[in-house]
């Protein structure tokens, strides 16, 4: 009797693989009734997928049979008729099955389409682009809530998420074409790698002026001081990246010298918070995110927003004050673009968070360093140059559109606490 160990055990090829597809009116217990016929016969489930659209079921089961399934397949079709379903059972070639299995390591992407309205043209254009770049749509999911046609919402968001597989033939050209298409269709389109970091964000940092609030505070200060036109021109040039931020800030602050600090209180009391900000912050807090303001604006206003929105960190420029008036100078280092990226990295390290788990949101050229450093960088209602340079952009909805990029459904957003 030989004591040699047997060689590796080879799996016996399956007798047969079949794809079962069932469609029809959805109701309780359908899967139980269908699989009840399979259970005694040791049928293995190789894959399963189901969707229900407007109470209509679409179910797919990829099955491996250990015995001749001919009679059983006929029974399943008959059972489907009794249940009001159309059931098709078709054989799958072994080679085709193994080829399908071999592709499970293909890169995966999430493409998010959102805006005020989605029409057939949106799907036609996007699906065509993905096909041209050799990407295959695997799953399509609606993240936005159901739309009533009887009780109209005057500011609805609509969002569809595509789970896509494959290696794009030209990633840079793909992103550029999606950006142009979004502008043409007046919507937002984002594409992200579907990796563990996308599902595990932990930090979100915001620019303040024209991002968390719908104004540039320095322009408001200048308006009260009678120099708004001069300051606004410098601000615009800085936001477009035409001027060095540090120099432009000093020039603008010099024009504000002598302004009474009481003006700051008046402006802070009426900051126009960007639509969707409260909803976004309520949700990310519930998800355990850390939040930060990293702003080239001013700490006085950032701290006011910190109290209003529940922000964890505020880093901005500290205005120097003497005898109740602005001196035209700042105290400490200027928070410019490079410092924003540095502060984002420091907060992430302090909180034990990888930069891949961080989100950065801004609208100006001085936001690009932190936007590009973060795992998810978003240009929010930004200038064209900034929008083209950022990884993602939002141009048609409020700040709560960021939730769609995180895969959050409308129905999962915490309700506003009206008891406060």
Image (cartoon, rainbow, N blue to C red):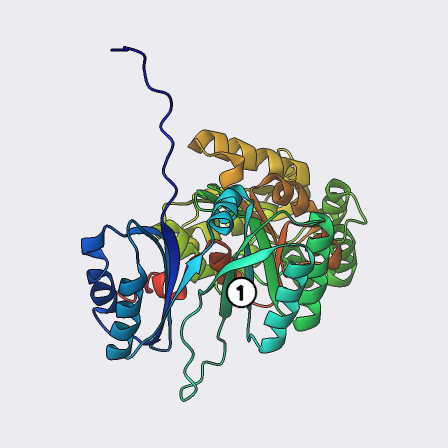
**To which quarter of the image does residue 381 belong?**
bottom right
Most foreground residue, 37 or 350: 37
Rendered residue at 63%/36% (across/down): 339
Check disc 1 and report the residue beneath it: 398
Question: Residue 177: x and y, percent?
Answer: 72, 59
| Residue 304 image point, x, y percent | 47, 52
Left or right position of 151 against 295: left
The residue closer to the viewer here, 10 or 404, is 10
SS for dot 1: loop
> Depth check: 56 or 396 in front?
56
How would you rate the neighbour count of disc 1 (Cα within 10 Å): few for under 14, some for 14-19, many for 20 or more?
Answer: some
Q: Is residue 52 among the parts visible in the rendering?
A: yes
Which image quadrant: the N terminus? top left
In the rendered image, the vertical position of residue 334 relative to residue 186, given as above or below = above
Query: In terms of depth relative to the viewer, which is nearer, 79 or 232?
Result: 79
Residue located at (31% from left, 72% from top): 77
Residue 262 makes an appearance in the image: no
Q: Relative to residue 10, is residue 233 drawn left or right?
A: right
The C terminus, quarter of image? bottom left
Q: Is residue 207 left or right of residue 239?
A: left
Q: Residue at x 43, y 33 (%)?
A: 351
**In x, y percent, where is residue 401?**
51, 62
In the rendered image, residue 178, in percent from the top left (x then y), is placed at 67, 60
Residue 404 versus residue 325 in the image, above or below? below
């Amino acid at each position: 009797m030989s004591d040699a160990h047997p060689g590796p055990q080879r799996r016996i090829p399956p007798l047969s693989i079949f794809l079962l597809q069932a469609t029809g009116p959805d109701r309780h217990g359908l899967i139980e009734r269908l699989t009840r016929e399979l259970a005694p016969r040791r049928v293995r489930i190789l894959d399963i997928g189901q969707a229900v659209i407007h109470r209509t079921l679409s179910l797919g089961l990829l099955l491996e049979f250990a015995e001749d399934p001919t009679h059983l397949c006929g029974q399943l079709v008959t059972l489907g008729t009794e249940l009001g379903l159309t059931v098709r059972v078709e054989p799958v070639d072994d080679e085709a099955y193994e080829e399908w299995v071999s592709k499970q390591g293909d890169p995966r992407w999430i493409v998010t389409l959102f805006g005020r309205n989605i029409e057939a043209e949106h799907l036609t254009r996007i699906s065509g682009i993905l096909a041209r770049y050799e990407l295959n749509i695997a799953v399509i999911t609606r993240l936005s809530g159901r739309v009533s046609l009887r009780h109209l919402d005057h500011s609805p968001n609509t969002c569809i998420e595509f789970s896509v597989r494959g290696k794009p033939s030209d990633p840079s050209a793909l992103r550029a074409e999606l950006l142009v298409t979004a502008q043409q269709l007046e919507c937002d389109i984002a594409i992200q790698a579907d990796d563990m970091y996308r599902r595990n964000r932990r930090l979100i940092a915001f620019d303040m002026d024209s991002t968390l609030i719908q104004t540039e505070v320095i322009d408001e200060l200048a308006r009260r001081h009678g120099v708004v036109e001069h300051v606004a021109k410098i601000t615009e040039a800085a936001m477009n990246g035409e001027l060095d931020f540090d120099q432009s800030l000093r020039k603008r602050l010099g024009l504000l010298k002598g302004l009474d600090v009481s003006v700051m209180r008046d402006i802070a009391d009426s900051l126009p918070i960007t639509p969707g900000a409260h909803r976004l912050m309520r949700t990310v807090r519930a998800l355990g995110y850390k939040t930060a303001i990293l702003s080239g604006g001013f700490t006085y206003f950032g701290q006011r927003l910190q109290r209003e929105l529940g922000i964890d960190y505020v880093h901005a420029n500290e205005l120097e004050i003497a005898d109740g008036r602005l001196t035209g100078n700042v105290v400490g280092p200027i928070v410019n673009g490079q410092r924003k990226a540095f502060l984002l990295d420091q907060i992430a390290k302090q909180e034990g968070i990888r930069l891949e788990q961080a989100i950065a949101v801004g609208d100006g050229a001085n936001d690009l360093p932190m936007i590009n450093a973060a795992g998810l960088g978003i240009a929010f209602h930004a200038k064209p140059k900034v929008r083209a340079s950022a990884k993602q952009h939002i141009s048609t909805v409020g700040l709560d559109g960021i939730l769609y990029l995180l895969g959050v459904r409308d129905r999962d957003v915490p309700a506003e606490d009206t008891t406060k």
